[in-house]
Amino acid sequence: GENVEQHPSTLSVQEGDSAVIKCTYSDSASNYFPWYKQELGKRPQLIIDIRSNVGEKKDQRIAVTLNKTAKHFSLHITETQPEDSAVYFCAALVSGSARQLTFGSGTQLTVLP
Amino acid sequence: DTAVSQTPKYLVTQMGNDKSIKCEQNLGHDTMYWYKQDSKKFLKIMFSYNNKELIINETVPNRFSPKSPDKAHLNLHINSLELGDSAVYFCASSQAGLFEAFFGQGTRLTVV
């Protein structure tokens, strides 16, 4: 099955700096790569996603890049704010009639004011 | 309206008991999931299910069983609860072609 590795497990940045989280996946058939943000005590929520026919996608301060050849993808957050502090999860989709999202182990991002 | 709702939000029970967690989605999605989130925050897929296929993660004990009375519901039944089952359980759903998974608010299960 699919295996997703995520680094780093914790990340602290100063407010206004950039943050980068990286993930690798194992199944070359995966074609959908979302990023979820989970605030303390809340449910995971999608913040951005990318499909395998696209190399980069940007939404305001958040961007995701995908390298299918190397099987890795990254989340970039610019101009970080304290409210960006949360656990971020990458995931990869295994296609099929009963699709499964396999998640990375999560990154605890702390933005220091 | 809550898109994916699960009940109860908190569940405290004794070892050996049998319990169920209910999940309902009103999004018209074709696939539903159960995830377990342990104390280290790792989100682990337990089941994914649509009307054609049930995929069971091979590491899930057979004390756990999904039950789907209809397309909008996927309940999780757990037999003979153990201390190690304590975690937050998330239900989620998604639609073919769109892929985004919507999560319920989670059920914090504590086995004492």
Image (cartoon, coloured by chain):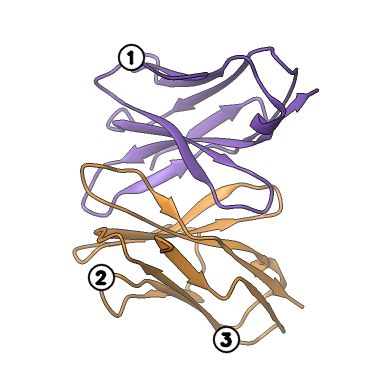
Q: Is residue A75 above or below residue B88?
A: above
**In the picture provided, is A69 more to the left or to the right than A24?**
left
Q: Is residue B7 above or below residue B99?
A: below
Q: Nearer the viewer, residue B49 or A38?
A: A38
- Which chain letter matches label 1? A
Residue located farthest toward the right when viewing the structure as drawn: A113
Instruction: Count up the numbered dots.
Output: 3
Q: Residue A56: image x %, image y %? A: 37, 15
| Amino acid type assigned to the residue bearing label 1 in the image | Gly
Which-is-in-front pick, marks 2 and 3? 2
For image coordinates 30% across by 43% down, the residue present is B99
For the residues marked 2 and 3, what is the alpha-carbon distance in whole angstroms? 24 Å
Point out the tag, 2 or 3, that comes first from the N-terminus. 3
Q: Which residue is mark 3?
A: B18
Task: State the hue of chain B.
Answer: orange
Quickly name the residue at label 2.
Answer: B71
Corner quadrant of residue A58: top left
Which residue in the protein does label 1 denote? A55
Residue type (three-letter) at the residue carrying disc 3: Asp
Report which colour depicts chain A: purple
Q: Residue at x 61, y 52 (%)?
A: A42
Q: Chain of mark 3?
A: B
What whole-number distance in Å separates the C-alpha atoms at marks 1 and 3? Answer: 47 Å
Q: Quadrant of the C terminus of chain B?
A: bottom right
